Amino acid sequence: MTIRIQTEDFDITKEINLLKEERSKCGKEDVGAIVTFTGTVRDMAGKTPISSMSLEHYPGMTEKQLEAIAEEANKRWPLLGTTIIHRIGELNPGDNIVLVITLSSHRHAAFEAADFLMDFLKSKAPFWKKEQPLEGEANWVDARDSDKKSLTRWEK
């Protein structure tokens, strides 16, 4: 399991290969499904054009919460590898924000686990997002009700 919070961009192919190599080092070639989700910065916040987005987090606490949710995903689905990378700092439209990768022997587990992880990241992860419109003052962004609602489908 890989959890990273970083300012620099990530290489999706490199991260997939790292997970696959870990399985190969164990003498396993049992990966049948690799699901990735990459979130990027849009140039619009609703109907308002933005020039940038700034992401902040609480160091230490954020990583612990991401580890806990990744462990929960690994309990719920037979995953063979998990990566969560989330960027912080100033980001521009088109920049990558988040990468989630799940590996499993079968596609359903990989898809469901990735979906579960993204629902958590969108609604519960301790990140604070500020959007800078092309005109006017920057504003902090709250989690959307639709993101919070999506999370409820995973309650036991």
Image: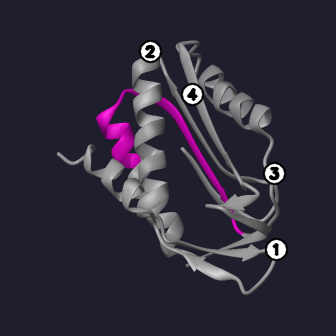
Left or right of 123: which side holds 25? right
Task: Classify mark 1: helix, strand or loop.
Answer: loop
Alpha carbons under labels 1 and 2: distance apart: 44 Å
Q: Name the residue under label 1.
A: 134
The stretch in magenta equals 71-88
Left or right of 68: which side holds 127? right
Question: 11 and 139: which one is in front?
Answer: 139
Q: Name the residue under label 2.
A: 106
Left or right of 45: which side holds 77? left
Task: Classify mark 3: helix, strand or loop.
Answer: loop
Q: Residue at x 17, y 45 (%)?
A: 156
Between disc 1 and disc 3, the foreground one is 1
Q: Mark 4 points at which residue?
A: 35
Q: Residue at x 41, y 64 (%)?
A: 124
Q: Position of residue 43 (x, y in %)?
A: 76, 57
Q: Position of residue 120 (x, y in %)?
A: 42, 54
Question: 90 and 10: which one is in front?
Answer: 90
Q: Which of marks 1 and 2 is nearer the N terminus?
A: 2
Question: 18 and 88: which one is in front?
Answer: 88
Picture disc at residue 94: 3
Task: Classify mark 4: helix, strand or loop.
Answer: strand
Q: Position of residue 88 (x, y in %)?
A: 70, 68
